[in-house]
Image: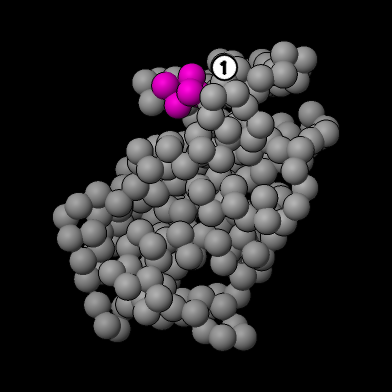
Amino acid sequence: MAKILIVEDEPGIAFGLESDLQTEGYEVAVVGDGAEAVRRAGTEAFDLILLDVMLPHKDGFEVCRELRQAGLPTPIVMLTAKTGEVDKVLGLDLGADDYVTKPFSPRELIARVKALLRRAEPPADAPRILEIGKLAIDPASYRVSHSGKPVPLSTLEFRLLYYLASRPNRVFTRDQLLDAVWGTDRFVTPRSVDVYVRRLREKIEADPENPLHLKTVRGAGYLFETRAA
């Protein structure tokens, strides 16, 4: 049974989310402010976090930033009344895996929760550890290290990195990567791939502006280069 943390300060919305998720068979915990969310997520094991943006004490963006900086890989879905592209991209930049705009339908939210939980499972077709230059990528534990030091990644960051690294020196379009990593039931756009690649470069490349591995092929897509490793 997956365990989900709901971070929502509006009692009506929190109760509705809790009821819907429990009906689907999930174990649910609810907190109403950002500071408590950071504490609970840091001391308890959750499989997914539903995180409202507008919260007391710490807003959802700050909570997401702190959890990712602490190395928490748990999938995070942002719940936001802000519909602007800038706000959505900011959430992805900070480490969120998806976003849902209020008001939302319970059916859509449950579909996204199920999709993210499926993606968080280790790849069944990729049991071997990849060692490329100073990088080591272990699909069994979702762990990555660089020069022997752990590199904290979210589950989707890991899946994107592993997909590219296990198919080296091949160019993939954004749509191909979305289909392979996010799946056909995705709710994100090709722009999300750019955000995730940028985040990965910041974590695994010594010089993100001149990456050794995660290369952009203009007009085509991305590839993981191993010839220089």
Extreme residue in the front direction: 57
Relative vertical location of residue 62 with respect to residue 137 in this rendering, above or below: above
Q: Which residues are magenta?
A: 35-39
Is residue 37 in the magenta section?
Answer: yes
Nearer-the-camera pick, 41 or 155: 41
Q: Residue at x 47, y 42 (%)?
A: 65
Badge 1 crowding class, 10 Å Cα cut-off, few under 14, some 14 to 19, many 20 or more, is some
Residue at the (71%, 32%) spot, across then down: 110
- Is residue 214 on the magenta stretch? no
> Residue 191 falls in which quadrant of the image?
bottom right
Q: How many marks?
A: 1
Relative height, residue 123 to residue 38 (above, below): below
**Disc 1 target residue:** 31
Of all residues, the one furthest to the left in this rendering is 148
- Mark yes or no: residue 186 visible: no
The quarter of the picture where residue 145 lies is bottom left
Relative to 124, residue 195 above or below: below
